[in-house]
């Protein structure tokens, strides 16, 4: 893959995916509509390569959350199917874990117990839970806060708990639905660096939904653009910025600027469509 | 301004003023059937010393504890089950509505016919008086479980038992405790009613007996004990309610 072409030229070649091996996730012509006739997804197709970070970006209400919920098995598509490692998803599976925009922590559980949740549910032995929780708490930098309750933590720290809880079950696929969307700008940047660091240590396949073009470029190996109504993947771009990445350096680079411009040009008509601009 | 005086001080002053006024008025008219605080206090000490009050109080408390305990043990699981399974909800709804709307007192003769005059009948009555607030509150609490947390639990492949333990019960705990608090209030009513209308025992017996003898000073003793019981248990429950879900009160603390 040559690095110096403009983003626009490489688009046509990209959707086939970057890796040669079999994809980890195949989203195969998935459609989903809700009562009242709103079509959330139509013939949405996507492939995710093992151990890549795929960012999905699209206008509000285009069906990103719905797509993630279908991949996780929380809801069934009307038609089409999702395969993870070649097996069709019909219900939530243990090897997929989700990180939520609303954090989804149990307010009555301490940090430790929240992190332990997935393992407890899986009935793992206490000794294993104990060790894994300690590791994951350490990993996300929450040592010393094990006995705290979520309401005693800042938003950024709460989402660290959410990350630790997901990493604790050692999933082969991590799904993140705007995990940093409710954080302030500075915390958000810190968390992006944290996630890059975590992902370097604990390689998994990561599907990351975001509203932020910046975030998608900083984190993603590839960026999938979603269209509005009916929601489907319009385009998949290679980010092609080498890792390890330092967000500040990336933001200063030419590749960042051209990708950003290209994605924004692609998204603008979609976003305009949602707010009723001409 | 009264802004500087604490609410507790106002309450205390008001109660003291009431007691003093009662005492003065009682002493002034000084009839046999009008007891006032100091005579009631004396009667309380007497009845405690002779062991009469502890004996009857114990009888009453056993009935209350059994009835309330039964209501908790049955009301909470049934409430959760109704909230989780529509079939159970629709099947039980008519019975619960019917029983809840019927004045429980009207059932006393029937219960006596079926269960006799003794402890069994009394426990059933207390149970009927307090099970519904517990059951209905539990149901409401579980229904109000955060849908997003339900989805988190499903995403982590939680089974039904884990849903109850990790999610439903903790999330509904404030509702359940409020239900128990309401249940205690009604349970006390049920207890006294049972003691009046089935075999006359316990604090209810004391009330009936001393009323018949025109001993109003002693008559007030079981009444005061009931009041203390009600206030004490209710405020204990309130305290537990507050401490059980500190995250609900963060905004107030800050
Ligand atoms: N449970 C539901 N019932 C009915 N309609 C729904 C439901 N969930 C989503 N929708 C509709 O489906 C469409 C896509 O919703 P979805 O939440 O997937 O969008 P999104 O891309 O995640 O939006 P956002 O960026 O705002 O999070 C929206 O029009 C939404 O109103
Ligand atoms: Mg969404």
Image (cartoon, coloured by chain):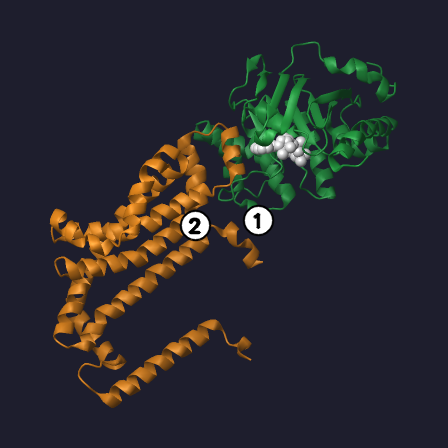
Residue at image point 20% right, 77% down:
B217
Eyeballing the image, is B220 above or below A141?
Answer: below
Residue found at x 85% / y 26%: A255
Q: Are marks 2 and 1 on the same chain?
A: no
Instruction: Examine the image and state in which quarter residue B91 appears.
Output: top left
Number of the front mark, 2 or 1? 2
Quarter assignment of residue B242: bottom left
Return the residue nearer the eye: B198 or B63. Answer: B198
Q: Which residue is mark 2?
A: B174
Quadrant of res B230: bottom left
Q: Which residue appears farthest toward the bottom when viewing the image?
A: B28
Q: State the image coordinates of residue B223 (x, y, percent, origin top left).
A: 24, 69
Q: Residue at x 39, y 53 (%)?
A: B178
Q: Residue at x 30, y 57 (%)?
A: B186
Query: Is residue A136 rendered to the left or right of residue B169?
Result: right
Image side of residue A152 versus residue B48, left or right: right
Mark 2 CB lies closer than 8 A to ligand 1: no
Residue named by callout 1: A152
Residue B126 position (above or below residue A58): below
Q: Position of residue A226 (x, y in %)?
A: 72, 25
Say which quadrant the C terminus of chain A sits in: top right
Q: Is residue B161 visible?
A: yes
Q: Note the chain letter of the green one.
A: A
Which color has been applied to chain B in this rendered view? Answer: orange
**Residue closest to the far front:** A36
Please give the label number shown on residue A252. none
Name the secondary structure under disc 2: helix
Q: Chain of mark 1?
A: A
Query: Which corner quadrant of the figure contains ligand 1?
Result: top right
| Mark 1 residue crowding within 10 angstroms, few (<14) / some (14–19) / many (20+) | some
């Amino acid at each position: 893959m040559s690095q110096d072409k403009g983003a626009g030229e490489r688009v046509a070649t990209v959707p086939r995916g970057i890796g040669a091996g079999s994809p980890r996730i195949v989203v195969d012509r998935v459609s989903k509509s809700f009562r009242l006739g709103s079509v959330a997804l139509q013939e949405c197709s996507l492939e995710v390569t093992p151990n890549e970070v795929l960012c999905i970006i699209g206008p509000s209400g285009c069906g990103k959350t719905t797509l993630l919920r279908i991949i996780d098995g929380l809801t069934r598509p009307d038609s089409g199917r999702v395969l993870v490692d070649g097996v069709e998803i019909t219900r939530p599976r243990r090897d997929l874990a989700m990180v939520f925009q609303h954090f989804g922590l149990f307010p009555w559980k301490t940090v430790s117990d929240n992190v332990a949740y997935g393992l407890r549910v899986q009935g793992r032995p206490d000794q294993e839970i104990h060790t894994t929780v300690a590791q994951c708490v350490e990993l996300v930098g929450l040592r010393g806060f094990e006995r705290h309750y979520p309401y005693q933590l800042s938003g950024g720290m709460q989402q660290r708990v959410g990350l630790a809880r997901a990493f604790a079950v050692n999933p082969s696929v991590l799904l993140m639905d705007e995990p940093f969307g409710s954080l302030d700008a500075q915390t958000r940047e810190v968390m992006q660096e944290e996630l890059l660091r975590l992902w370097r240590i604990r390689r998994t396949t990561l599907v990351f939904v975001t509203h932020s073009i910046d975030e998608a470029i900083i984190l993603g190996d590839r960026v999938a653009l979603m269209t509005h109504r009916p929601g489907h993947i319009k385009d998949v771009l290679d980010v092609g910025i080498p890792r390890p990445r330092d967000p500040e350096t990336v933001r200063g680079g030419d590749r960042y600027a051209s990708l950003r411009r290209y994605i924004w040009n692609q998204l603008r008509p979609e976003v305009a469509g949602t707010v009723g601009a001409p | 301004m009264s802004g500087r005086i604490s609410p507790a001080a106002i309450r205390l002053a008001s109660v003291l003023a009431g007691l003093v006024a009662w005492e003065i008025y009682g002493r002034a008219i000084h009839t046999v059937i009008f007891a006032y605080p100091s005579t009631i206090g004396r009667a309380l000490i007497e009845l405690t010393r002779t062991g009469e009050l502890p004996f009857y109080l114990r009888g009453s408390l056993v009935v209350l504890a059994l009835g309330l305990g039964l209501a908790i043990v049955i009301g909470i699981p049934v409430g959760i089950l109704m909230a989780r399974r529509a079939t159970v909800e629709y099947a039980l709804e008519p019975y619960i509505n019917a029983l809840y709307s019927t004045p429980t007192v009207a059932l006393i003769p029937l219960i006596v016919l079926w269960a006799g005059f003794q402890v069994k009948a009394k426990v059933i009555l207390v149970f009927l008086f307090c099970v519904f607030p517990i059951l209905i509150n539990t149901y409401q609490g579980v229904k109000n479980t955060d849908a997003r947390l339900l989805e988190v639990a499903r995403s982590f492949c939680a089974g039904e038992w884990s849903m109850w333990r990790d999610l439903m019960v903790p999330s509904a705990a404030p509702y359940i405790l409020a239900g128990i608090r309401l249940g205690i209030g009604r349970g006390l009513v049920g207890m006294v009613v049972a003691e009046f209308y089935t075999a006359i025992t316990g604090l209810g017996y004391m009330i009936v007996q001393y009323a018949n003898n025109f001993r109003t000073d002693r008559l007030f003793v079981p009444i005061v004990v009931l009041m203390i019981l009600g206030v004490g248990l209710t405020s204990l429950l309130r305290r537990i309610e507050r401490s059980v879900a500190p995250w609900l009160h963060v905004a107030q603390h800050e």
